[in-house]
Image (spheres, rainbow, N blue to C red):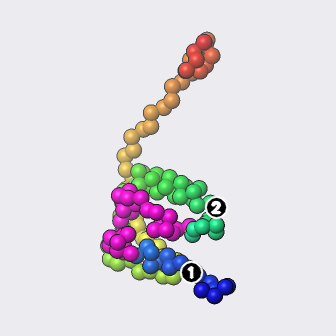
Amino acid sequence: LPAGTGILIAVWAIHNREDLYPDPTAFRPERFLERSYAPHELVTFGGGTRRCIGAAFALTSMKLAVAAAVRDWDLRLLDAGPVPLARRGMPFCQADGTPMRAAGRREVAPVASAPTAPQSGGSGCPFHPS
């Protein structure tokens, strides 16, 4: 390529490869639990020296938010039909997001609490009582 030629990565084309993502247009978030993707197969935050510096924080935050929503709510898609795509800058996204509704709150088992400090005497530390 001549010097100064701009190169773009076709993220939409990568994320729609049948060999990487069987039935790529289906809403199947569990596909990311079924296998690990190499950095060049899942290009959500760019790559190389221009990779987003907040990618790890963003992914962790999103995983925690989605885990809390899935844990606490019975979520349902509003429409089971195909999801229309729109181009927003470089990537393709769902044209109108992914309309869902919370069908109801789930019963969540209480989290076990940490041991409490003694009421009188001792150091107050459950691991070093005196």
Please indicate, yes or no, whether residue 78 appears anywhere in the rendered image.
Answer: no
| Image vertical order of residue 37 relative to residue 15, above or below | above
| Image vertical order of residue 62 relative to residue 51, above or below | above
| Image vertical order of residue 84 relative to residue 58, above or below | below
Q: Residue at x 64, y 67 (%)?
A: 49
Q: Residue 127: x percent and y percent?
A: 55, 20
Residue 95 circle label = none
Q: Secondary structure at mark 1?
A: loop
Which residue is disc 1 drawn over? Answer: 8
**Type of amino acid at the residue the image marks with label 2:** Ile
Residue 129's quadrant in the figure?
A: top right
Residue 54's quadrant in the figure?
A: bottom right
Q: Is residue 67 shown in magenta? A: no
Please indicate, yes or no, whether residue 56 appears anywhere in the rendered image.
Answer: yes
- Please tell me how crowded label 2 is: few (under 14), some (14-19), or many (20+) other residues with Cα within 10 Å: few
- Please tell me how crowded label 1 is: few (under 14), some (14-19), or many (20+) other residues with Cα within 10 Å: few
Q: Residue 21: x percent and y percent?
A: 37, 70
Which residue is disc 2 drawn over? Answer: 53
Q: Is residue 72 left or right of residue 117?
A: left
Residues rendered magenta in the picture: 17-45
Q: Residue 45: x percent and y percent?
A: 56, 67
The C terminus: image quadrant: top right
